[in-house]
Amino acid sequence: MGHLTRKEGDDPGDGRSLSNTRDRALRLLAMRSHGKDELRRKLLAKGEPPDHVAQVLEACEQQGYLDDAVFAYNRTIARVAGKGYGPIKVRSELLALGIEPTLVAQGMARAMAEIDLEAVVGQVVARRCAKNMPGSSVSQEKSARKRCFDILFRRGFDSETIQLVLP
């Protein structure tokens, strides 16, 4: 099966047709992009037959609807530049979604080449830490800087990047 069009007689007799699996996969992909493993899990969780899921995933890959490297790239752009998360957290999320480590590395490398990470960290500092930064005493300022460092570290930024940006 190399395409995603409906076919006559693709009902295996259990009420779950290949076209239903195809339709469900395309609906999920229309809402947002998915990694292959994530889409497989969702389809199986909805009770789709494993053989149908395998065929549909293969067809989606052949048609270019499903590409883990592109997914890793897009997810990195969205999470780092869009939501202010660091590359460490995004890498962890992608791996947890079942994206192969080599594809994670490729997609993230391409995305990170387009992102000004220091600017992203600066925006997070302005949004999440600025109200705490101007302290009236040295100890308050030190405490505020530590809180901000912790926020950024939990968001997935490495300590070297954080130290470049924190005042």
Image: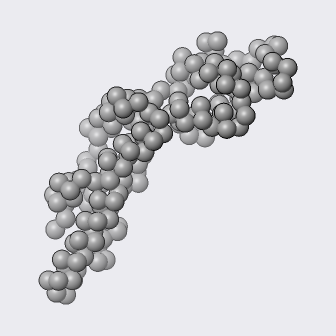
Q: Which colour scheme is used?
A: one colour
Residue 151 vertical placement versus 34 (above, below): below
Q: For the C terminus, which image quadrant? A: bottom left
Tell me the residue at 63%/18% (across/down).
55
- The number of discs equals 0
50 vs 38, left or right, is right
Tell me the residue at 21%/83% (across/down).
140
Question: Image quadrant of residue 91?
Answer: top left
Instruction: Tell me where residue 44 appears, x and y as whole percent.
Output: 66, 33
50 vs 76, left or right, is right
Q: For the N terminus, which image quadrant? A: top right
Q: Is residue 114 visible?
A: no
Instruction: Tell me where residue 159 appears, x and y as whole percent.
Output: 20, 56
Question: Image quadrant of residue 102?
Answer: top left
9 vs 115, left or right, is right
Residue 136 vertical placement versus 24 (above, below): below
Instruction: Tell me where residue 115 appears, x and y as whole percent.
Output: 29, 44
Residue 53 vertical placement versus 44 (above, below): above
Front-lying residue, 151 or 100: 100
Q: Is residue 1 visible?
A: yes
Tell me the residue at 62%/21% (across/down).
54
Extreme residue in the bottom direction: 136
Instruction: Tell me where residue 20 appears, x and y as whole percent.
Output: 75, 27
94 vs 150, left or right, is right
